[in-house]
Amino acid sequence: MKRGTLPGTTAVASKGWLRAHKWLILRRLSQLGVLGIFLIGPLAGIWIVKGNLASSLALEVLPLTDPYVLLQSFFAGTAITATAITGAAIVLVFYLIVGGRAYCAWVCPMNMVTDTAKWLRHVLNIKGAGSHPDRKMRYWFLAMTLLLALFTGTIAWELINPVSMLFRGLMFGMGMGWTVVAGIFFYDLFISRDGWCGHVCPVGAFYSLVGEKSLIRVSAVRREQCDDCMDCFAVCPEQQVIRPALKGASRNIGPVIMSANCTNCGRCIDVCDKNVFRFSTRLNNSVNNTGHLSHNKEVTS
């Protein structure tokens, strides 16, 4: 990536703006669509889904439960119903297929806030403080939320969880929620790139554990075409997940990004003008002796 240019500029020139933003557009439609199906009930009386992101009933028959909230309830000693367990099982199976942290990229409303902060960092050329929390910190925070539930007997984290606060704020008015959301925005903008989602958020940490063995993955299927422009690294919220798949042929590492912290956001696919990346599955991760892909069928992007 040339100094002073936005990542994906070359892809826009070669593929066109729409193809260079395909997965970003689909993600925004997904995020806004999820919010929309919850908001259309109280605002217009059309009840596609009743409830919230923690627990809901879709089309009057399908229970959906956030497994992270259910786990907190278990630690808090709250009585758990069979419906809640069924709802959590449905959500878990879904994310075991599409990738646990796909929640972060395709559902979580805070992602739009943090992505905006990252975009402004590029536009304004903000370097930030130059230091980041250890990425393992999010797992410590995850443990702390469960211990908080255990010792307080409540799901106390959900009262201050920015995801829950933003959702409640859109439904009922933000109040002090704006302070929390703004704090995360400015933290990502001025202090730490992808600081909240990539280093701190316990929700993302939980879903990374859920998606450890998930089926759908991003693959550097044409990694031999990579010209080291670094645009994929510039847009990736978890930059450490790309290098093994992209540069690992000499070490007999397959082209599929196997890290549980890949959010399956698809931005690396968008911004690569060499079409190195595409969506595939974890089953297509073999290399032959020359380091090239074996001829397995892939999921096209």
Image (cartoon, grey):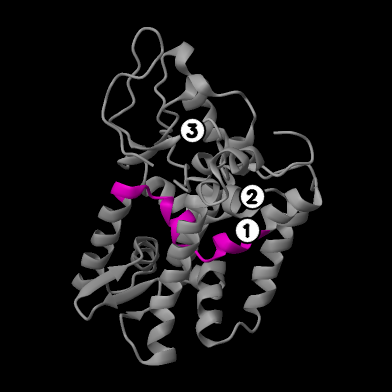
Camera-nearest residue between 230 and 215: 230
**Which amino acid type is marked by label 2?**
Asp
Q: Identify the mark nearer the N-term, 1 or 2.
A: 1
The percent position of residue 295, horizontal first and vertical second, equals 28, 21
Q: Please name the residue shown 47% across and 58% down the image.
A: 27
* Residue tagged 3: 275
Q: Report helix, strand or loop for mark 3.
A: loop
Does residue 109 appear in this view? yes
The part of the chain drawn in magenta is 96-116
Q: Residues within 10 Å of mark 3 (few under 14, many from 20)?
A: some
Looking at the image, residue 294 sits to the left or right of residue 218; the answer is: left
Q: Residues within 10 Å of mark 1 (few under 14, many from 20)?
A: many
Looking at the image, residue 84 sits to the left or right of residue 31; the answer is: left
Q: Please name the residue shown 50% across and 57% down the image.
A: 25
**Label 1 with label 2: CB-CB less than 8 Å:** yes
Membership of 106 in magenta stretch: yes
* Residue tagged 1: 114
Q: Please name the residue shown 53% across and 45% down the image.
A: 267
**Label 3 with label 2: CB-CB less than 8 Å:** no
Mark 1 vs mark 2, CA separation in Å:
7 Å
The percent position of residue 146, horizontal first and vertical second, equals 45, 60
Residue 197 lies, with reference to residue 168, above or below; the image says above
Mark 1 vs mark 3, CA separation in Å:
26 Å
Mark 3 vs mark 2, CA separation in Å:
25 Å
Residue 87 lies, with reference to residue 56, above or below; the image says above
Image quarter where the C terminus lies is: top left
